Image (cartoon, coloured by chain):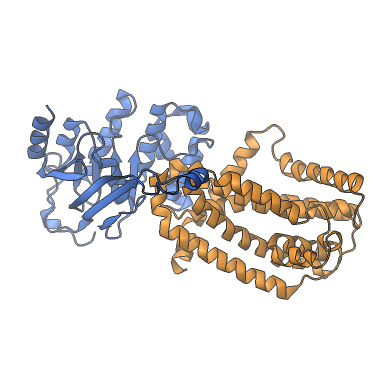
Amino acid sequence: MQRFLKDLKRFWAYTVYSAKSDLKDEVASSYLNWLWWILDPLLFMCVYTFIALAVFHQGVPYFPVFVFIGLTLWNFFDKSVLQSVKAVRNNGSVVSRVYFPKYILVINRILVNGFKMMVSFVLIVVLMLIYRVPVSLNVFYVIPILMELTLFTFGVSCIVLHFGVFIDDLYNVIQVVLKLLFYLSGVFYDISRRVEEPLNSILLDLNPVSMLMQSARQCLLYQNHPDLKLMGIHTAISFLLCIIGIKVIYQYENSYVKVM
Amino acid sequence: MENYNSDAVPSSGEREFLRPDLTGRDVAIDVNDLHITYKLLKSYSIKKSLFQLKKTKAETVDAVRGVSFSVTEGEIFGIIGKNGSGKSTMLRAIAGIFSADKGSIDLHGHTVSLLSIGVGFQKRLTGTENIMLSGMLLGYSESYVRSKMDEIIEFAGLGKFINLPVKTYSSGMYSKLAFSITAVLESEIMLIDEILSVGDTNFRRKSYQKMKSLISNQDRTVVIVSHNNDQIRELCSRVLWLHDGQIKMIGKTEEVLDAYDRFMS
């Protein structure tokens, strides 16, 4: 753990700089550049809102914002995990030349996707203003929610990064698993109302992503506060995942290059 | 570094022809009974592991088998041997990129950088950005790398290409940039893998000069892997000859090179 903090301090500047360059590169290599960070979730919001309202005839108050919050959190988690699977291979040229702790690659992805999430959040505020969502002080619960999401994402990403090095087709497997999780997480429907008891509380309480999504919506849209006890348990689990991930990476990272 | 024997250092005038006297200096690299093994079947697909449960025993290649040597601070150490004899593998292990399967490598706390052909850049990013990233990966602060930036750019001599993505570079330009970064941002131990013969004649001369000036710096330890015997003969004080992952011979440059020449012809 001490080694983790020391390494983190040493490579932090590098991580931030490389995340910045990655973002800059993304902007430079597409026509609509940074607009995509907004357009992407916005367009998907339209798609899912259309499907939910026109096909399934179901909605909740402030439905587009409801979907948009879900998508914002989901994209962050989904992209960070998926990109981590191939992170070592994709950075092979750097990995085979100089030593650095490989979870730095995960942190890089989290910073990049986290920045996009922040852009998305600005849009959430705008949407909330447009829809005249009443707010209370509970909106600030969104900060611990995002921190817990980051922690969970980091833990999961570190673990898939490790196995992604050794298993060639893990990417495909993770893709399917994430798709399943996407539909189970209630990005575009309300689990607590649409799914029967007791399945709905199982889906909500056991799945960290849906739990966080639900909590974020509760505090942003409906002036509620999240279930703190549940959050605490999930945070503890996320911590455990992070520690496992970091341990595994430290133990095996020096053989990654041999496999590639 | 503090405890090197200043009496033993020849005056700067003589230095060009004298190799630094290394008696009484600290050891920079200690390699002890190093074994490195590649497992050929390491990376597998899920389908394979499902359908070939029996055949789990991976084929292994022993790249380095029981090598021990030590390099003194300030020494220029050469490694020779035919292709596939484990030279690059060993350099990577010293750089900390590989783990040793058996045995140990002790750098006594020195900073180390590995210089080899055609690796190390994020292809989508520009030359300048890659300089920053490489420098910071080597452990230098952002402001330090920035202060050295002009020197690196000038040494690399890439002109306007420095602000273009690295993927637009030719392979020669690529290596020139790599060499410049490591040469200007000097780490205490430099591991050089076959890079002294890159670039055009002009750059080759420049990098050769740079190498020579690095040699005159008493604190720098350099390990060179090269197939160019003339370079080894001129630069190195001691040479290690690797053959099939084992030490065939180690000692004074002339003796080892002569034996090696006889062996290869």
Chain B colour is: blue
Residue at position x 39%, y 34% in the image: B118
- Rendered residue at 30%/48% (across/down): B37
Quadrant into which the N terminus of chain B falls: bottom left
Query: Can you give x and y, in whole percent of width and height, for residue A165 in the image?
Result: 48, 48
Total number of numbered discs in the rendering: 0
Q: Residue furthest top?
A: B201
Horizontal side, residue B39 vs residue A55: left or right? left
> Residue sitting at 60 percent across and 38 percent down?
A25
Q: Position of residue A28 (x, y in %)?
A: 63, 35
Q: Is residue B137 left or right of residue A242?
A: left
Query: Who's the residue at 55% across and 47% down the image?
Result: A170
Inspect this view and state whether residue A56 appears: yes
Q: Nearer the viewer, residue A206 or A230?
A: A206
Image spot of residue B237 (x, y percent): 14, 43
Specify whether B209 is left or right of A257.
left
Report whether residue A19 is seen: no
Q: B41 or A104: nearer the eye?
A: B41
Chain A color in figure? orange
Between A199 and A162, the residue placed more toward the observer is A199
Residue B136 percent across, percent down from the top left:
45, 50
Query: Which quadrant is home to the C terminus of chain B?
Result: top left
As displayed, is residue A220 above or below residue B155?
below
